[in-house]
């Protein structure tokens, strides 16, 4: 059995310096890997990226991350990514990584993702150049997630995104903003790529549990949804929650 800890939307900034790390105390005893599902900062500044790196460095277990929309806000995403690497975190964007865990080899494929909506209520690549570019970007990141998942040589696979692949985990958010919270194309990538679990953030008012059309468990790990420092899900057991 592999224990996967996950959280997103920790939104760290100067006022929270030193306040999140104590909540991670002992995590290496409870999990084999920690996944960070984006929106690690408040405004995507270099200073905030350094704060995040300081809070999650040297936790005693592998840490894998994707960035979120907040982390792009100040156009410092490359600097934030560098800070994460310096802290020993593995940032992903259209790539995969395999972690050797006591329960087997865990493959994680990650992308930030993007919006676009869900079946029956989604944007299409038609009309103005701006709309075409919006939908094309979602198609591109979904394709990258699919290929990254397929390329993993692992016993178990997890898809890590910021935007949601499933509208079930958005329940509680205003329906009008669903197209800006995720895309069904991400769910197609999860199903076709052979993932056993998908985790995302972004939807602060959503709910924790959903599933792709193919039946893959989807978990919204945004900190405001979890109400705890992180959640732990298990792979290789009878069910995803059975840790």
Image (cartoon, rainbow, N blue to C red):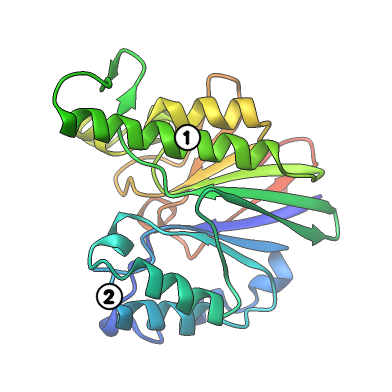
- Nearest to N terminus: mark 2 or mark 1: 2
Q: Residues within 10 Å of mark 2 (few under 14, many from 20)?
A: many
Q: Residues within 10 Å of mark 1 (few under 14, many from 20)?
A: many
> x%, y% of residue 73?
23, 62
> x%, y% of residue 14?
28, 84
Task: Read off the residue under disc 2.
Answer: 45
Checking the image for residue 80, the label placed there is none
Q: Residue at x 57, y 32 (%)?
A: 190
Q: Label 2: state its secondary structure.
A: loop
Up the image or down, 122 lies above or below 88; here it is above
> x%, y% of residue 18?
41, 87
Task: Read off the residue under disc 1.
Answer: 142
Q: Residue at x 27, y 22 (%)?
A: 125
Label 2 – label 1 distance at C-alpha: 26 Å
Query: Does residue 242 appear anywhere in the picture?
Result: no
Q: Is residue 97 left or right of residue 128?
A: right
> x%, y% of residue 173?
25, 37
Up the image or down, 183 lies above or below 148; here it is above
């Amino acid at each position: 059995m592999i224990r996967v800890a996950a959280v997103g939307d920790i939104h760290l900034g100067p006022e929270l310096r030193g306040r999140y790390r104590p909540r991670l105390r002992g995590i290496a005893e409870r999990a084999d890997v920690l996944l960070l599902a984006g929106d690690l900062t408040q405004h995507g500044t270099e200073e905030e990226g350094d704060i995040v790196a300081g809070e999650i460095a040297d936790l005693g277990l592998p840490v894998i991350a994707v960035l979120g929309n907040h982390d792009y806000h100040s156009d410092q995403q490359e600097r934030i990514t560098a800070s994460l690497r310096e802290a020993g975190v593995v940032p992903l964007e259209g790539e995969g990584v395999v972690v050797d865990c006591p329960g087997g080899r865990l493959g994680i494929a990650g992308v930030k993702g993007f919006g676009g909506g869900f079946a029956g209520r989604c944007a299409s690549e038609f009309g103005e150049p701006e709309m075409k570019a919006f939908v094309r970007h979602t198609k591109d990141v979904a394709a990258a997630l699919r290929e990254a998942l397929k390329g993993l040589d692992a016993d178990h696979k997890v898809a890590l995104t910021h935007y949601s692949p499933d509208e079930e985990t958005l329940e509680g958010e205003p329906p009008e903003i669903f197209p800006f919270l995720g895309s069904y194309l991400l769910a197609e990538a999860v199903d076709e790529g052979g993932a056993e679990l998908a985790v995302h953030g972004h939807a602060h008012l959503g709910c924790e549990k959903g599933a792709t059309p193919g039946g893959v468990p989807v978990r919204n790990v945004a900190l405001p949804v979890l109400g705890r420092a992180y959640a732990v899900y298990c792979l290789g057991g009878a069910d995803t929650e059975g840790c």
